[in-house]
Image (tube, helix red, strand yellow):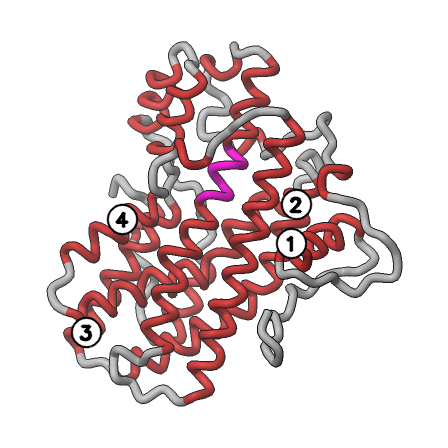
Amino acid sequence: MRPGVSPPSLPEYDASDPVESAIVSRLASNWARRATVKKAEPELDDLFDSSLSDYPEALLPFAEHPTYLALSPEQKQRLQAWAWIAFNKNVMDIEKYVVNPGFDVLAEDRLGVGLGDWAAVAVNQAMVDEQYHTLMHFNASSATRRGRGWGLPAKALPDVLTVRTRAQALDAAEGPRKIALTQLAFMTVAEVSITAYLDLISDDPGVQSINRATIRLHARDEYCHASIAGELAVLVWDSLDRGDRSYLLEGFEGAMRAFSGTDFGAWRAIMEIEAVTGGQKMLDDIESGRRNNLFVQDYSGIERLYKTLNLDRISPTLTNPRA
């Protein structure tokens, strides 16, 4: 690194926790410096426990389907490992292609709100944090691939649902202002809701300690980011006219549907890669069934934001996509 340029501060972590320390030490080495610890910390690979699941089986959308239940233990384990790879890809792609571009709208004040330097500093620091989060989840996926001895290439999966939906919304946006509002809407929803997504895994004792610790570290930063994104969304909202507010609100609800949904595109690719007999039919059954197909069902983050903006509750179509 150039003299006088310091690397970004590392995520807050518990130095007494060997798993969290190992994750942060790996980050530190990636930035060409060592974390300050009093003793040598274990490598991530040393912490991998092949007897534990890579992902909570109960969160698989087809966990109770007869086709899945009939699979061999190794086939089930491979699908759970794939679920973790897909989970990480979802996080990384949202950070890179949804969150940071949305923060950039605020950093450059593209909506002409008149945000000061304090806002630019806050969002640029958040963008740096997001790079760390991306690297943490990449390291966690790599540890799974090494630990299992399986390829599990994330690049074989399609763009994640939120990224695909955002791209469609941007294509439909007319002019730079609506593009900026769309980017802001998707970023805001992601940042105020990401902890609900992460918390789905963080407390499951049957899941790899590396995976759970990665999520804990990420979630700690995101509680702060949610506050930043929410406060800035309020400032922007107060500056908008009725038309812009209506457009932003539509963006919030479209982003929430995408963020909450089960990504069947990823699962269809996985079933093809793994050549699961009846796998596509199983997904058809789940996707067309009457049950709620939403993956994230905690709307508390966006509901708090709506309350601050003096808006009614979120649309019932979010909690019941078939309404």
The amino acid sitting under disc 4 is: Thr
Residue wearing tag 3: 244
> Which of the marked residues, 2 or 4, is nearer the chain's N terminus?
4
In the image, residue 164 lies in the stretch drawn in magenta? no
Point out the residue furthest to the front here: 2
The residue sitting at 36% across, 71% down in the picture is 104
- What residue type is disc 1 on? Arg
Secondary structure of the residue carrying numbered label 2: helix
How many other residues sit within 10 Å of disc 4, few (<14), some (14-19) or many (≥20)? some
Q: In the rendered structure, are the residues bearing label 4 and label 3 in contact, judged by CB atoms less than 8 Å apart? A: no
Magenta residues (range): 83-89
User: How many discs appear?
Assistant: 4
What's the mark number on residue 165? 4
* Residue 278 against residue 178 in the figure, above or below: above
Q: Up-down: is 121 above or below 205?
A: below
Name the quadrant of the N terminus.
Answer: bottom right
Which mark's residue is nearer the viewer, 2 or 3?
2
Which numbered disc, 4 or 3, marks the residue that appears first in the sequence?
4
Q: Quadrant of residue 172?
A: bottom left
Using a 10 Å C-alpha cutoff, classify the residue at mark 2 as few (fewer than 14 neighbours), some (14 to 19) or many (20 or more). Answer: many
- Residue at disc 3, secondary structure: helix
Q: What residue does disc 1 label?
A: 216
Q: Main secondary structure of the magenta part?
A: helix
Name the amino acid type tagged 3. Asp
Q: Work out whether 268 lies above or below 170.
A: above
Q: Residue at x 36, y 58 (%)?
A: 98
Q: Which mark is residue 212?
A: 2
Is the C-beta separation of discs 4 and 1 under 8 Å? no
The Cα–Cα distance between marks 2 and 4, rounded to whole angstroms, is 28 Å
Q: CA distance from mark 3 to mark 1?
A: 36 Å
Instruction: Tell me, yes or no, whether the two marked residues, 3 and 1, touch with CB atoms within 8 Å.
Output: no
In the rendered view of the protein, which quadrant contains the C terminus?
Answer: top left
